Image (tube, rainbow, N blue to C red):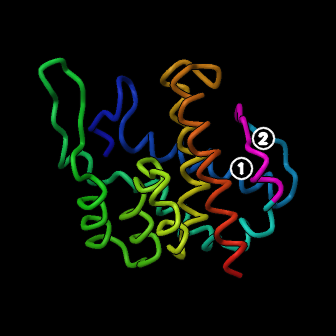
Amino acid sequence: MKNCEQTKGMSVLQHGESVRDYLFDLINHLRSGTPLKYDWRLPDWVFENKDLILSSLPDDETLELYTTYHDCGKPFTLQIDDEGKRHFPNHAQVSYNIFNEVFDNPVAAQLILHDMDIHLLKADGVKDFSQNPYAITLLLTGLAEIHSNCQMFGGINSTSFKIKWKCINQRGKQIINLIQNKK
């Protein structure tokens, strides 16, 4: 992971550590009101559903393993196209398999397996996604990841970030609503 670039100047391991740091920045802010260290644009649903979100998260050790190693399979799936762009086909499944060979944490493994789901989620899949017992964890981690990644693409005011934020904001509202109505 240290020797495989996620993007120019950032290894896969550094990416995982960044997502972890962003996620815990947000969680600590929600838990105790500590000031945020990073630049955030937080959706209203985060604050409106703080208790639900915090009560849905697995333990911190699991979250740390998940976020740090969520892309551990990328070095084994790396493909570089004719234009020099990096691709990591099927990396979630490969990451899940590798993680299970090294660690004994079934919850972190399931989170790794489904890590990409929130990023690929379409409107017609929200109901099924919200039935995943880890839906809120995947949602919150997805929010942390787009904030972590936005630094590579021009920051929080970039068009790329705004598009990803709008999508995760909409999906987040839908997911939270479905989970609340189920209780």
* Quarter occupied by the C terminus: bottom right
- Label whose residue precedes the other's in the sequence (1 or 2): 1
Q: Which residue is at the front of the view, 105 or 93?
A: 93
Instruction: Indicate left or right for 21 with 109 as reference.
Output: right
161 over 90 or under it: above or below = above
Give residue 10's quadrant in the image: top left
Left or right: residue 165 versus residue 6 is right
Instruction: Find numbered disc 2 in the image and state the secondary structure of the residue it sits on.
Output: loop
Q: Position of residue 33 (x, y in %)?
A: 87, 52
Q: Which residue is mark 2?
A: 36
Q: Position of residue 140 (x, y in %)?
A: 61, 55
Residue type, mark 1 in image: Leu
- Residue plotted at (45% across, 66% down): 111
**Residue farthest right in this picture:** 33
Tell me which residue sits at (80%, 61%) in the image: 50
Q: What separation in Å lies between label 1 and label 2 (alpha carbons)?
A: 7 Å
Q: Residues in magenta? A: 38-48
- SS of the residue under disc 1: helix
Task: Tell me where residue 27 sits by quadrant.
Answer: bottom right
Q: Residues within 10 Å of mark 1 (few under 14, many from 20)?
A: many
The image position of residue 19, as x and y in percent, is 53, 46
Q: Is residue 170 left or right of residue 17?
A: right
Q: Which residue is mark 1?
A: 26
**Residue at the outermost left position:** 82
Residue drawn at (41%, 71%) of the image: 110
Q: Mark 1 and mark 2 in contact? Answer it, CB < 8 Å.
A: yes
Which amino acid type is shown beneath numbered disc 2? Leu
Quadrant location of residue 70?
bottom left
Residue at x 26% of width, y 47% of height: 74
Q: Residues within 10 Å of mark 2 (few under 14, many from 20)?
A: some
Residue 86 percent across, percent down from the top left: 24, 31
For residue 15, above or below residue 80:
below
